[in-house]
Amino acid sequence: MAVVVLYDDYEPPSQGFYFRQETWSEWNGSRLVASDVSGVDEDTLDAFPNRRTAVSPPPEGARQVVRGRVAMLVEHQHPFALEAPVSFRPVGNPNPDRFVRAYEFESLAQSAAYPDLIGRSAGDPEWSEEVRELYLAQHSDPRIAELEEQILEESNIPPAMGEDPFARALSTKLWLDRELIYSTRERHAGVDDPTIDFLFGSRIGYCVHFAHAAVFLYRAAGVPARVGTGYMVPAENRRGGSSILVRGADAHAWPEVYLEGVGWVVLDIAAERNLDEPSQPLDEDMQRMLGEMAREQPADPEQEIRDEEPSEAFELPAPLWAIALILAGFVLLVLYSIKLWRRLAPVFSSTKAMPRVASRAYLDRLAEVGLSRGFGETRESFAKRAADLSPTFAEMTRLHVAARLSDPKAPAEGRPHLDRSRWKELGSEIRGELSGTVKLWRRLVGIFHPVSFLDAR
Amino acid sequence: MENDFQQSEHITYEPAPRIGDLQGAYGVVTRIRDRLRTAVLGRDEVIELVVIALLADGHVLLEDYPGSGKTTLAKALGDSIIDDLPDDDIVTIRRIQFTPDLLPSDVTGTTIFDPNTNRFFFRPGPVFAHVVLADEINRTSPKVQSALLEAMGEKQVTVDNRTRALDPFFFVIATQNPLDLSGTFPLPSAQLDRFLFKIRMNHISRDAELQVLASLKQRRSGIGSDLPRVTRTEILDARAVVENAVHLDPAIRECLVDIANKTRADPRILQGASTRALVLMIPALQARALSQVRDHVTAEDIHALGTYVFGHRLELAPGGDTLETVVHECMAEPLERLARATMQK
């Protein structure tokens, strides 16, 4: 089971979404199987992509770009995509609890209506002879060719279109729609050739039988054909936001024909008679919910698909709060570094810068305990105000102001601010006074205040 | 300081050693301060300002109620000073009580005819003193006021077209009553500008007042008269020391100009501070620095003297904030800049 979310608007002309997973083209004597001949069926992927992976694209005519995301609810063997895929790329699992994996695809899906396909030649002129023969390989039983001849005779194709490949294939399909009876109970098991047993027996069977019969009849009509397998979901099952629930019961096999300039076109059989019970209706709520989940953090889908090399980081998108936390931590670190530097600077300061640096360090300490100079207040008045906490601070202020405003040419003995040890002495006295007058908790709060120094002026 | 104390007790005919450094000048400050504080109780702030004005060569205007100690203060100041030039005609202290009928010659002096010699001679008026107490200066006519103001501004008087110089010491303490204004001639702002400080005095504290009453008897018997005094020359020397030895950083001058510009730009002020205010303020700042035992002027000096210097020079627009508020607000920004300058490299 899987949820497919289409990013682009798309109405399939076949009234069904065909998600191709594998193709069978090679006749092995009893049935069609996947071919390993080079140049054959290179439009599917065997393994899940771990980077953007392109497959052999269809011709661009009569097609439109459809992009989508597949979130798988259970493990599948191969990736599938809306026919006909161009590339696959992995994406982060939007909800690991719910999904086992997710990937995105870009397809060139058929956009032309079936009648518009008339008038094109069959096959691709660029195919090698070997490939062409493989796609046109007939069944060994001559009755099939005879049946096809009979079908075409009975059909009412206008004579002008008598040789048109698609018109011939289409009339064959319409004949099969009428003649075949759908039932999953008739398995045609245990016989040598189920196709013959089905087509020339009861004509009751299911998709695999239909597909095989149709492919051989199309080939008999001269149209290259193969069986596509995967999932088919009726277009009406699509729900809000283009989410499509692909269930196991949707597994399907269908015939495809190749038209020049269009590529492989699904020409499925819709049997008019069905012996099976109608399938269980979809749980719409579940489909919608799963669709929402699969859609989580689609980021910019176009960007993602454009990325040639998705980075590992994209696989593990960091939550926003973690980034915010790291940023906040960084800012705090910077602030504390500033604080620490201002506090320790007197130790490293030159004698010339000492008055400024030491005063700043102790202004910081006073600001930490909530005492800072007001606007327009002189340093001396502030020191007087701070005398309750530290009487010695006034002396430090006096030296600090003297360092700036006293006569720089005065003899050194009259200028105690040039004495390094005096600053050291004053500092330790102020520290002692503060630890005596300010409660420990208040000092601790101040120390951990990251921006207290902004108040120190 | 011990030396300074000795110095002042010299007999006037033996000149005291000259004062040449800050320590000596500070000695002058402490001696005057101590004497004034003993004589006038509870007025330490006013005494401080008077001493600063004395050293800054400025005059003070006291706005005060009668009986609040103005005369005592002026008299104590006169008593603190030893006139070491007794031969000139200048005495240490004079008091002029201004009344509406006073004439300019009553202040400046006049020429008198001496019948014995048949000659006119000049008889100096009360301004020829070191300390002049001009009591109730707003009670006299503008003519007399301007005679005194010439003396204050130029340190000279002109009588009968002859200009006579006053002593360089010349120091005026003028007073006016802030309430009893009927029949007065308020000083125009141009004349107020000549006073360095206008000091608004409040009533002294309860404790100080009690002490005044308790020490009444000792006061009459001349308490504190034995405290050391200063000579006129010492004060003049101290003025020179203040001017030369107290450092004035260019940042301080910038701050002053900024404050003046602020007062001129403030919409609440009709007339801002004059350049003369700044010129007079600089020695005052230096004198205050000395009185705070500092060899340099700081923002604190500007902050402390700002209202006394600018207060009477500003003309406030009606209906605004009080003068103190306006002056402090004008000073805040330049002072802030000055405070931050100390943190710059």
Image: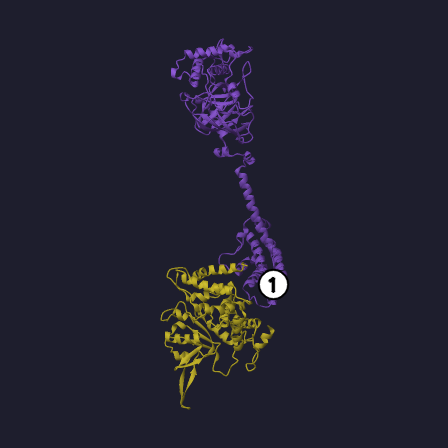
Q: How is the image coloured?
A: by chain
Compared across the picture, whether B238 is left or right of B151 comes to right
Q: Position of residue B302 (x, y in %)?
A: 49, 64
- Disc 1 is placed on an element classified as helix
The colour chain A appears in is purple
Report the amino acid beneath label 1: Leu
Q: Is residue A143 above or below residue B110?
A: above
In this view, the residue in front, A116 or A389, is A116
Residue B38 visible to an observer of this rendering: no
In this view, the residue in front, A39 or B5, is A39
Q: Position of residue A452 (x, y in %)?
A: 54, 51
Q: Which residue is mark 1?
A: A418
Residue A256 visible to an observer of this rendering: yes
Q: Position of residue B236 (x, y in %)?
A: 52, 75
Q: Is residue A392 above or below residue A101?
A: below
| Chain whose colour in the figure is yellow | B
Q: Is residue A412 above or below residue B13?
A: above
Q: In percent of the image, x 55 and y 16: which residue is there?
A: A28
Chain letter of the residue beneath label 1 in the structure image: A
